[in-house]
Image (spheres, rainbow, N blue to C red):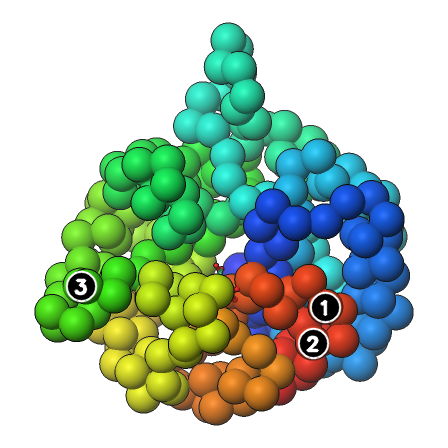
Amino acid sequence: MSISETRNRLVIGNWKMHGNLATNAALLAGLTDGVASVAGCDLVICPPFPYLAQAQAVLLGKDGIALGAQDLSTKQQGAYTGDVSAAMLADIGCQWVLVGHSERRSKYAETSQLVADKAQAALSQGLTPVVCVGETLDEHEAGQANAVIAAQLQPVLSLGPQAVASMVIAYEPVWAIGTGLTATPEQAQAVHAGIRASLVQLGVPHVRILYGGSVNAANAASLFSMSDINGALVGGASLIAEEFLRIAAA
Ligand code: PGA
């Protein structure tokens, strides 16, 4: 059974644009040394593109941590300066890729249709896309979270049950990312339940739904106690090996 067909908890570290060869080496050593203590949880790390090869070399032949990327192109190959294709990611050993992170949506104007196209490109090479959705603070305060997320998911769900069954959804309220503010477990669960309902309607009830936004070792257990929270997408706390592993063990 592939990792995405199981219902193990899934914890993904999004390193964003942090690190260098030396700090990555220390972080990777901390992760590979400590991972044996984490059971029943699938772990993925998403380093920046230039360091995927470094991480792949360290993780090769070791169990417990898989490799993902933070973004990909919708194009297969060709004259697309600066882009990285799904085939390249698969070639370097990635099994996972984030698509539609809120920083991509807000800072690079990625539309929900583009995000769906990226998810499809990932699937075409056997990568598992982690589709990120979430509302801004203004949308949150206006009570629009569910409507915003439904609109963000719509083009993705239109890819059909077979495609969506091979994805992961990550709910990341924008107001909670990197701010130290976390949705309460109840707030997050309410949104996750709405996402779950749309997955059930599509006939893919077992797709994992991650929570993201200032997840740390202190708040992970209460988030994971919620029935529709199947893991976490972790930014800042994924840069500290011990903290990341404590989240996974929570
Ligand atoms: P954070 O980031 O954990 O630092 O809030 C989460 C994310 O952006 O994926």
Residue 21 in view, yes or no: yes
What amino acid type is highlighted by mark number 2? Glu
Q: Which element carries disc 1, helix, strand or loop?
A: loop
Question: If you read the primary sequence from the N terminus, does the residue marked by circle 3 or circle 1 appear first?
Answer: 3
The residue pinned by badge 2 equals 243
Q: Considering depth in this image, is 166 or 135 the residue closer to the camera?
A: 135
The residue pinned by badge 3 equals 139
Q: Which element carries disc 2, helix, strand or loop?
A: helix
User: What residue is rendered at 48% in x and 65% in y?
Assistant: 178
Horizontal relation, residue 83 to residue 207: left or right: right
Q: Position of residue 28 (x, y in %)?
A: 81, 58
Q: Considering depth in this image, is 144 or 250 the residue closer to the camera?
A: 144
**Marks 2 and 1: CB-CB under 8 Å?**
yes
Q: Where is residue 222 in the image (x, y as percent from the top left)?
A: 48, 90
User: What residue is rendered at 47% in x and 74% in y?
Assistant: 180
- Count of picture labels: 3
What amino acid type is highlighted by mark number 1? Ile
Q: Which mark, by number, is residue 240?
A: 1
User: What residue is rendered at 82% in x and 44% in y?
Assistant: 21
Question: If you read the primary sequence from the N terminus, does the residue marked by circle 2 or circle 3 appear first?
Answer: 3
Q: What is the CA distance from the residue labelled 3 to the residue labelled 1?
A: 32 Å
Q: Where is residue 128 in the image (x, y as percent from the top left)?
A: 51, 49
Q: Could you classify mark 3 by the number of other residues whose Cα lies within 10 Å: few (under 14), some (14-19), or many (20 or more)?
A: some
Horizontal relation, residue 186 to residue 158: left or right: right
What amino acid type is highlighted by mark number 3? Glu
Pick out the residue farthest to the front.
179
Q: Where is residue 146 in the image (x, y as percent from the top left)?
A: 18, 67
Q: Could you classify mark 1 by the number of other residues whose Cα lies within 10 Å: few (under 14), some (14-19), or many (20 or more)?
A: some
